[in-house]
Amino acid sequence: MLAILLGGGISLLISLLGTRVAIHWFTKWGYGQEIREDGPTSHHTKRGTPTMGGVVIIAAVVLGYFLAKAITTDVPSASALLLLFLFVGMGLVGFLDDFIKIYKQRNLGLRSKAKMVGQTVIALVFGGLALSPWLADENGRTPASEKISFLREIDWLVLPTILALLLVWLLVTGFSNAVNLTDGLDGLAAGASVMVFGAYMLVNIWQNNQFCQEEPSSSCYNVRDPLDLAIIAAAITGACFGFLWWNASPARIFMGDTGSLSLGGALAGFAILTRTELLLVILGGLFVLETVSVMMQVTWFKATKRFTGVGKRIFRIAPIHHHFEMLGWEQVTVVIRFWIITGLCVATGLGVFYAEWVARL
């Protein structure tokens, strides 16, 4: 537990202080955000606000985790190192996207295919290593499982390795892009991430307390390294909290794709490594809502254009948070209400998680 407190506290301090330094230097270097032309006109005043703040979040998490392990003289686990690989790897893809936007002074960074290739490579390497028997512990537990999971592994839903890798790819690319879509208003993605990663910290602490020491059973959790995963969850929660101080409206810095892709990838990583893959749909309900709104908008526009010749829209603009802005809601109102939605999703997810354990007693 000391390592969890240290990881979260150190990460919070580094993010809080480091983001202030990043604002100064990114402004001096001209690392400003480009704004989409078809978005709400109120966003045009944000042009030039420093971006790539996700670099600070990533640095804070990595330093927070390793300093906590060093202070407690503990060795990093395979699960933690894999999750950090996914977190930093997705952040690198986002960094390339952000850097191209800044260098070429446009709202488009990496082409969609190039970005997907980068995400796919990171996701498949992560999935291959996580499922590998080479990283199994003394009881044969690999970091990830080939069984589909909701609150724990579903024994009769065992996937062939290729399909298990496909599921890993779907979760990683899906949620990294979902957080990226959500990161469109000051503090929205950072605030929502605080709650969801905080929930995973609690899930990991609970799984560690009810850990299957040897043989799996219905009253314990067959997860490799839950306590180490809790340290990373605490570190990410702290880093997002510290960043939110500067990212809240009016934002003085944006996390950019560097931050959003890394956070989304980490969410998927937690779901996979904690055997709670389908539970993430509840805990991360806001991110799912944002993604579904875009999918509905694009699908309906293409369908109506094909059959009527005129493309029609369900929302005034997607993702859905911009739709409410176009209806006249203040940006702060949208953010706070979407935070409330996230809080309800997290409370529901944690409630379902705990209720399932109680029911098995």
Image: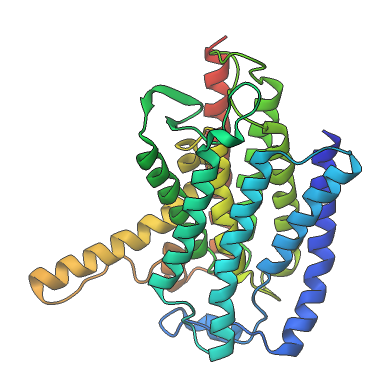
Q: In what quadrant of the picture does the N terminus appear? A: top right
Q: Residue furthest left?
A: 307
74 shown above or below 246: above
Q: Which residue is pictured at 73% across the width and 82% down the height?
A: 26
Q: Which residue is pictured at 77% across the width and 75% down the height?
A: 22
Q: Residue furthest front?
A: 134
- Residue 107: percent from the left, percent from the top? 49, 83
348 shown above or below 129: above
Image quarter of residue 70: top right
141 shown above or below 72: above
Answer with left or right where residue 310 lies relative to residue 77: left
Badge count: 0
- Residue 183: percent from the left, percent from the top? 54, 65
Q: Which residue is pictured at 28% across the width and 66% down the height?
A: 298
Which of these two is toward me, 175 or 287?
A: 175
Q: Which residue is pictured at 21% across the width and 71% down the height?
A: 312
Scheme of colours in the image = rainbow
Which of these two is toward me, 258 or 344?
A: 258
Q: In what quadrant of the picture does the C terminus appear? A: top right
Which of these two is toward me, 212 or 333?
A: 212
Answer with left or right where residue 97 lies relative to residue 301: right
Image quarter of residue 148: top left
Which of these two is toward me, 146 or 217?
A: 146
- Residue 357: percent from the left, percent from the top? 56, 18
Image quarter of residue 307: bottom left
Q: Is residue 187 in view? A: yes
Q: Is residue 335 in view? A: no
Q: Which residue lies furthest to the top in this view?
A: 361
- Residue 283: percent from the left, percent from the top? 53, 41
